[in-house]
């Protein structure tokens, strides 16, 4: 049990800026096996976002509360996945071939594709959450609690199904480049999908369908363009899937 707790804290420390206990050891091997808990990290991030929204919505207009709750979650994660999205936009948008795309993604500077992509991503997520606020405070909170774990499951599935394509041993995602066992994948799937129980059946089906569609499309696109994934690609798929879940929920609630 202690080992499993150590793996969870390893994942939490890698994917967020949140403090972890000093007694938790770190090694690339532990991070490798911690992939099963990536969706569980989404529970923590989603709970932070939901709590921030519920508190801020009591005293501020919905638009401001949404933007500030997004800022809180970005602060909690250190913009880890947003950075991956921007780098992937730069590399996949500006690179003509695999080598050029990988080279661009490794550059720490942000380019035109990354700037525009990040701006549109954040604006669209904010707009979707503001629209969901019309369903009441619980609408946004539930969306956050569902989207963060499920979108991290989407990234985890890429680790299991695609090959890691960057040869650089210093790459920060290199320790993650191992396919999950059946038990590990089942555990990750459970943590990622369980929050769907918070939704009505139609909304849950819409959110799940949106997540699956974006994940499958992302996997196909990355396999065709790069032959696999990088750490930035994992962040990009997480961001794209998170947005797709909000849009799926919005579509379901507007329809009903």
Image (cartoon, rainbow, N blue to C red):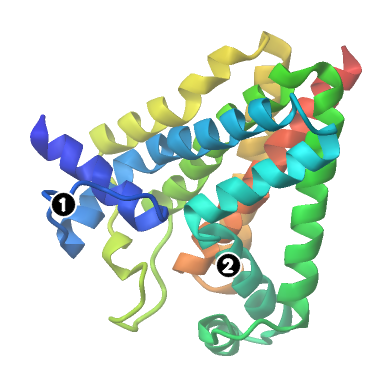
Q: Which is more N-terminal, label 2 or label 1?
A: 1
Q: Position of residue 78 (x, y in %)?
A: 50, 60
Please give the residue where the numbered disc 2 appears in the rendered image.
83
Residue 229 visible in this rendered orientation of the protein: no
Determine which quarter of the picture holds residue 223. Answer: bottom right
- Residue 142 picture quarter: top right
**For this rendering, which residue is in front, 247 or 52?**
52
Q: Secondary structure at mark 2?
A: helix
Which residue is found at the position 54% from the left and 64% from the top? 233
- Asked whether residue 204 is in view, the answer is yes
| Residue ID for mark 1 | 22
Cα separation between marks 1 and 2:
27 Å
Residue 183 lies, with reference to residue 224, above or below; the image says above
Question: Can you give x and y, in whole percent of width and height, for residue 149 in the image?
Answer: 50, 35
Observer-nearest residue: 128 or 220?
128
What count of labels does the image hold?
2
Residue visible at 82% across and 38% down in the picture: 128
Towards the viewer: 106 or 94: 106
Q: Nearer the viewer, residue 18 or 112?
A: 18
**Could you tell me which quadrant the N terminus lies in?**
top left
Residue at the extreme front of the image, as rendered: 59
User: Along the horizontal axis of the image, is 61 left or right of 9?
Assistant: right
- Relative to residue 157, is residue 36 drawn left or right? left
| Residue 219 position within the rendered picture, expressed as x and y whole percent measured from the top left | 56, 55
Taking 235 as reference, is 113 above or below it? below
Query: What quarter of the picture does the C terminus occupy?
Result: top right
Residue at 84 percent across and 39 percent down: it is 63
**Would residue 256 be found to the left or right of residue 209 on screen?**
right
Crowd band around label 2 with a 10 angstrom C-alpha radius: few (<14), some (14–19), many (20+):
some
For label 1, the crowd category at 10 Å Cα-Cα, with few meaning under 14, some 14 to 19 and many 20 or more, is few
In the drawing, what numbered circle is on residue 9?
A: none
């Amino acid at each position: 049990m202690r080992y499993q707790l150590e793996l969870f804290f390893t994942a939490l420390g890698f994917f967020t800026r949140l403090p972890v206990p000093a007694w938790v050891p770190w090694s690339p091997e532990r991070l490798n096996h911690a992939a099963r808990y990536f969706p569980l990290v989404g529970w923590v991030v989603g709970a932070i976002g939901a709590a921030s929204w519920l508190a801020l919505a009591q005293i501020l207009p919905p638009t401001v509360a949404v933007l500030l709750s997004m800022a809180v979650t970005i602060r909690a994660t250190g913009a880890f996945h947003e950075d991956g999205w921007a780098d992937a936009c730069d590399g996949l948008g500006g690179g003509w071939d695999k080598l050029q795309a990988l080279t661009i993604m490794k550059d720490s500077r942000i380019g035109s594709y990354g700037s525009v992509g990040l701006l549109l991503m954040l604006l669209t997520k904010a707009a979707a959450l503001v629209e969901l606020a019309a369903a009441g405070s619980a609408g946004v909170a539930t969306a956050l609690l569902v989207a963060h774990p499920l979108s991290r499951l989407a990234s985890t599935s890429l680790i299991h199904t695609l090959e890691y394509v960057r040869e650089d041993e210093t790459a920060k995602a290199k320790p993650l480049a191992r396919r999950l066992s059946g038990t590990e994948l089942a555990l990750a799937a459970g943590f990622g999908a369980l929050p769907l129980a918070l939704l009505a059946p139609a909304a849950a089906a819409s959110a799940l369908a949106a997540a699956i569609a974006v994940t499958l499309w992302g996997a196909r696109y990355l396999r065709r363009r790069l032959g696999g994934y990088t750490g930035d690609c994992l962040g990009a798929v997480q961001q794209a899937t998170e947005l797709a879940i909000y849009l799926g929920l919005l579509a379901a609630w507007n329809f009903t």
